[in-house]
Image: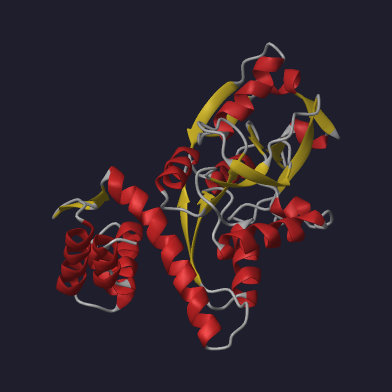
């Protein structure tokens, strides 16, 4: 190691890296300061000093728009997280804490999967590894992919559909689309319903990629076009409309245990024929980033929970 490198490591502090990671994750210096119980000026000065030490511009600060990372800043963010994770492990060794996991873990989750998949994983994980500082972000499929590539997320729970890149991934389960009706809809009396019979009926469709393209592809494969009455980005709103209006139907993949709307009205679920192709739910992470020990353990736990979850899988299906 030459003299310049030695001086760099002497000047660089883990505290500065932790402040930078907090600002990058929160998006504003104010939010990072609140998270770390520090003053905004202290956080700002710490980031400035880190940039001076590295000789790099890491972020652009705009008073009205918060903080955005430069391309270099996104690369440094990924490295900073790894350094902090390794430092946490060294700290545990010095305290005789063995192999107990510690450090940051940032998980992304597709919006409609958050209420069904994430709570179980979050509670199980944090109870097993209380020293891991786990946080999560909800977002669209596109946002999650972008944040994985930028290093802002360690891992994301999403669909293995319409991916812009080819990430590493582990399949959790593979649900399929089904139709849902209000109690008064004539199709609610059928054991199953064909796409051909569904196509002319008014459809309430969740408009959130890749859910929309998945539903449309089912009809397209049969040479059909659905009669879309209403587009909504709210999963629960679509269920509530269908439960109240017996003239329309919905198509989802997520199957919550509760088969009633928020108003307590019954929702009737029916299988679709022909059997739709699966819509895999996966854990995904960037091929360019080695999983940190907390992230690798998250993957291991998720695989274990879903490997023998056949009886529970209906309540954890996702749309």
Q: Nearer the viewer, residue 7 or 94?
A: 7
Image-quadrant location for residue 12: bottom left
Q: Is residue 144 left or right of residue 183?
A: left
Q: Nearer the viewer, residue 305 or 263?
A: 305
Image-quadrant location for residue 194: top right
Name the residue at 62% across, 82% down. Answer: 98
Q: Is residue 1 left or right of residue 250?
A: left
Image quarter in which the C terminus is found: top right
Name the residue at 60% across, 44% down. Answer: 239
Residue 32 in sight: yes
13 relative to 233, above or below: below
Numbered-mark total: 0
Q: Is residue 110 left or right of residue 313?
A: left
> Please, which residue is most extreme toward the front here?
2
Q: Nearer the viewer, residue 1 or 181?
A: 1
Position of residue 122 measured from the top left corner of the image (x, y, whole percent): 59, 66
Name the residue at 58% across, 64% down. Answer: 293
Q: Is residue 111 left or right of residue 121?
A: left
Image quarter in which the N terminus is found: bottom left
> Please, which residue is most extreme toward the top here?
223
Position of residue 200 measured from the top left corner of the image (x, y, whole percent): 65, 18
Residue 254 in sight: no
Name the residue at 73% across, 34% down. Answer: 278
Colour mapping:
secondary structure
Position of residue 37 measured from the top left corner of the image (x, y, whole percent): 29, 79
Position of residue 258 measured from the top left corner of the image (x, y, whole percent): 70, 56
């Amino acid at each position: 190691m030459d003299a310049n490198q030695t001086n760099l490591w002497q000047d660089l502090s883990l505290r500065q890296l932790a402040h930078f990671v907090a600002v990058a994750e929160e998006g504003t210096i104010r939010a990072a300061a609140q998270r770390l119980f520090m003053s905004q000026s202290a956080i700002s000065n710490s980031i400035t000093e880190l940039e001076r030490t590295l000789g790099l511009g890491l972020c652009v600060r705009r008073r009205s728009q918060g903080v955005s990372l430069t391309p270099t800043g996104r690369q440094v963010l990924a490295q900073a997280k790894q350094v902090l994770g390794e430092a946490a492990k060294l700290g545990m060794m010095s305290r005789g804490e063995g192999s107990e996991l510690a450090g940051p873990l940032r998980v992304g989750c597709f919006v409609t999967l958050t209420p069904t998949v994430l709570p179980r994983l979050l509670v199980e994980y944090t109870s097993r590894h209380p020293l891991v500082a786990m946080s999560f972000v909800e977002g669209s499929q596109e946002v999650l992919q972008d944040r994985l590539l930028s290093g802002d997320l360690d891992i994301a729970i999403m669909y293995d559909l319409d991916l812009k890149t080819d990430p590493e991934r582990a399949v959790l389960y593979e649900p399929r689309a089904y139709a849902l009706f209000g109690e008064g809809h004539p199709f609610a009396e059928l054991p199953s319903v064909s796409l051909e019979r569904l196509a002319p009926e008014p459809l309430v469709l969740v408009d959130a990629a890749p859910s929309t393209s998945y539903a449309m592809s089912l009809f397209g494969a049969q040479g059909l076009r659905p009669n879309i009455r209403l587009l909504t980005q709210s999963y629960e709103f679509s269920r509530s409309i269908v439960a109240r209006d017996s003239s329309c139907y919905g198509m989802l993949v997520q199957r919550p245990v509760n088969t009633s709307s928020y108003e307590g009205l019954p929702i009737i679920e029916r299988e679709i024929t022909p059997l739709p192709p699966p819509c895999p739910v996966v854990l995904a992470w960037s091929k360019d980033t080695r999983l940190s020990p907390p992230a690798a353990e998250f993957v291991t736990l998720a695989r274990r929970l879903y490997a023998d979850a056949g009886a529970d899988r209906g309540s954890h299906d996702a749309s």
